[in-house]
Each structure stands twice: as C-alpha cells, then as structure tokens.
Image: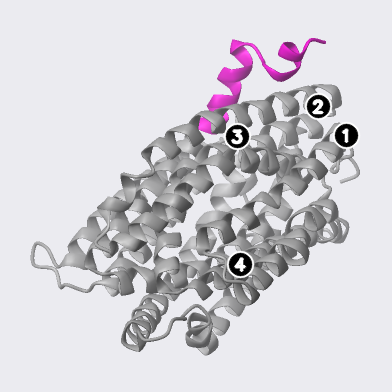
Amino acid sequence: MSIRKKLFGDKAFYAMVLGVAVPIIIQNGITNFVSLLDNIMVGRVGTEQMSGIAIVNQLLLVFNLAIFGAISGAGIFGAQFFGCGNHKGVRQTFRFKLYICAAIVLLGVLIFLCGGERLILLYLHGEGNEAALEATLGFGRQYLLVMLIGLLPFTVEEIYASTLRECGETKLPMIAGVVAVCVNLVLNYLLIFGKLGFPKLGVVGAAAATVVSRYVQAAIIILWTHTHADRMPFIVGVYREWKIPGQLAGNIIAKGMPLMVNEILWAAGTAALNQCYSMRGLEAVAALNISSTISNLFNIVFMAMGSAISIIVGQLLGAGKMEEARDTDTKLIAFSVFSCLVLGGIMFLASPFFPRLYNTTDTVRTLAMRLLQVAACCMPIWAFMHSTYFTLRTGGKTIVTFLFDSVFLWAVTTPVAFVLSRYTGLPIIPLYLSCQLLDLIKCAIGFVLVKKGVWVNNIVAAD
C-alpha cells in the first residue's frame, strides 16, 4: 500500500469523520471561545482577578478530569456495546457512570471546602508585592465557593452527553453546549460589569454565570434524552433498577479504573507543573493563563479527533472489523497531525495580537506572546501524542495509557520542571519549552505501540 493510501482516505471517509468530529469541534470551539471572552472580560478588570480565577480553574481541572476519566472508563465499553447493538450493555455502563461520579462529586466538594485556600496559596509567589498576592487569594477564594455549586450539573451533563456520543449522537450535546455558552457569555457581561441594572460582581459574577449556564446545559440534554427514547433505547428503564452485573462491573473497573486514576494524576501533575511555573512570579501566572486560554481555542481540533478515534475506532472494534479499525485509525492520526500543522502556523502568526486584548502590563503581554509561539510549534507533537493515547485507550489498553500519560508526567516532566524552577535561574520561556519538548519521548513510545497493534481488541465480546 502506498504512503498516500495509507495516510489519506477518500471523500466518503472524511465526510464520515467530519460528521463525528465537527459537532464536537463546534461545541468545544464555542465553549473555548466563550472561555476566551470570559478571560478577556475578567482580564479587563485586573491582573489579580484574572490570576485568581486562573489558579482556581487549574484546581477545578483536577475534578473535571476525574469525572472525564471515570466516564471514559465506562465509555470504552459503551461505544463497543453500541457497535454490536447491545443497548442493555449501554444502559448498564450508564448506571456505572452515575455511581462512580456521585462519589467523585462528594469527595471533590469536601476537598475544596476544607482545603481550597491552602491549595490556592501554593501558586502565589513573589517578593515585594504582598498586596497583589493577598488580593489574588481573595478573588480566588470567592470564585471557588460559587463554582462549587456548578459541580453537580456539570457531572450529570457529562454522564448523559458522553453516552449520547457513544451512541453516535454528537449534535445534541453540541446544541446544548452552544446554548449554554451563549447564556454564560451574556450573564458574564451583565454580572461582571454590572450592566442593564444587574449588580457589578466581578469574579463572583463570572462564577455565577458559569454555574447558571451549566444548569441550562444539563437540563437540555436530560430532557432531550428522556423524550427521545426511540433514538436512545438505553434510557428506557434506566432508573427502574440500579443493579449492574458483577462481571461487567468488574471488567469496567479493571479497564476503567486505571483510566480514571490516570486522568486524576494527569490533572494533578499538570497542576503541579503549573505550580513550578508559578515560581517565576505572578507575571508568569498571568501570562500562562492568557496563553493557555488562547491555545485551548486552537487545540480543539486534536481534542475532537481524540474523541472521534474513541467513537469511530471503538465501534469498529466492537463490530469485529479489526483491519478496518487499524486502517481507519492510521488515517485519523494523520488527519489530526496535518490539521494541527496548519492551525499551529496560524496561531504563531496571530500570537502578537491576542495579549493586547488584556488590561495588563507590557511584560505579561510579551511573555504571553512568547508562550503562545512555543505552544504553536508544539501543536503537531501534541496532536500525534493525543491520537496515539486515544487509540491505545479505545482498545482497552488502559494500564498502558496510565504509564504512557500520567506516570510519565509525574516521573519525568514534573521532576524536570521542579529542578529547573527551583535550582536554576532559567526564565519562564525556556523553562516552559524544555518541559514541553519532553513530549517527544511519549510520541516515540506511542508510535511503537500503535504500530505493533497492541490495541486491536474487542473488549465486549464476553459481555
């Protein structure tokens, strides 16, 4: 087979891929675009407010990814069950998600209520600006307390939306996401700045807008699912009983628990990595917040392609079409990398303009621009790494992905960042670049494992 035929599909192939990926890209794109606008709105208020929210959102990312990991662990079974037409299996994986996510919500609320302030303090460094550090802590504390109200609707929405996607319904979560971000955007404008008679609440207004939008999004998805049981048969009788077959629960735990632990450790590792970057002061924290918010807007393509790999390749594996799954996976990985080469170039060229939207210092703007340029150059690397990770995960190789992802982060990247941030005078830009280039090692490992085909498995045949 020629390289061209191996890496590139025909029009029908890309129509199928885009049918799955585009709704996810649109939903994530709108969400991240509104997050960017939110970030700019808060950034117009002040650097301390922006930094306080950025720190809390970094901490909440650990919770969000714990939910994502728990859902994804069951989701690899859900996609394959749907692929072989087993709606009862999908229903049981949905129930499993409810159980595990309820436990995570309770634990998360407890941790943030009891230790939230101490966690925020880990990111506050710098001499001679105690007033700014104290203000950042106060804004972060206010934002966190309101955001806790939104953990429950966020979790329920993710459980429903992920199951819908596993069953091939990607448009409804997109529509719900669009409505939610519009609500969030409007309420942000009204509540942050106190427009049209609304109170001027600043960071509290930003949090309140997010919470309300999450309830709206959850309501849309839940109501649609229960009123379209003909299209989503798994929802019929889903709450009539709460039993899950022991063998299935054991299989989900065996395959899914490493995935959930991986997501938690990865998010915690990312938080630890950013804590190392924060050793360079509040200006570094602010610049990283700006660059990461903008980067997330461009990263939506390879993130969506990871979800597409889970859905498309997962269904092929569940249907027993192993060779087609391998061929499709190769083309999906190539599509993700080539797309991100183009997007990375666009982001590099646009990097000088985005930081000018923020009401902050020239130093922060310059740092943000340089960080964006580093991220733009790394985007194809992240695309390949992300695609190989989802490929391995789709085939049930969750122990391998655990080692590949979070263990690598804690064993290699974070220790390097810790040493460089505390025992050298390396500025934030080369420090950040050094840590990102370590991902090349993961790309090499992912390439070998995917090429060997260790992930080509039907994990639901026995169930």
- Nearer to us: label 4 or label 2: 4
- Nearer to us: label 2 or label 3: 2
Task: Classify mark 1: helix, strand or loop.
Answer: loop
Mark on residue 273? 4
Sequence order check, earlier mark of 4 and 1: 4
Percent x, y of residue 198: 13, 68
Mark on residue 376? none
Residue pointed to by mark 3? 168
Q: What residue span does the magenta drawing correspond to? A: 1-22
Task: Classify mark 2: helix, strand or loop.
Answer: helix
> Looking at the image, which is closer to me, 337 or 145?
337
Structural distance between the alpha carbons of marks 1 and 3 = 25 Å
> Looking at the image, which is closer to me, 235 or 83?
83
Percent x, y of residue 65: 60, 61
Residue contact between numbered discs 4 and 3, judged by CB atoms under 8 Å: no
Residue pointed to by mark 2? 326
Residue 243 in view in this figure: no
Structural distance between the alpha carbons of marks 2 and 1 = 8 Å
The residue depicted at 64 percent of the width and 11 percent of the height is 10
Q: Residues within 10 Å of mark 2 (few under 14, many from 20)?
A: many
Percent x, y of residue 152: 49, 68
The answer to which image quadrant residue 149 occupies is bottom left
Residue pointed to by mark 1? 453
Residue contact between numbered discs 4 and 2, judged by CB atoms under 8 Å: no
Residue contact between numbered discs 2 and 1, judged by CB atoms under 8 Å: yes
- Amino acid carrying label 4: it is Leu
Structural distance between the alpha carbons of marks 4 and 2 = 34 Å
Structural distance between the alpha carbons of marks 4 and 1 = 32 Å
Structural distance between the alpha carbons of marks 4 and 3 = 36 Å
- Amino acid carrying label 3: it is Gly
- Amino acid carrying label 1: it is Gly
Task: Classify mark 4: helix, strand or loop.
Answer: helix
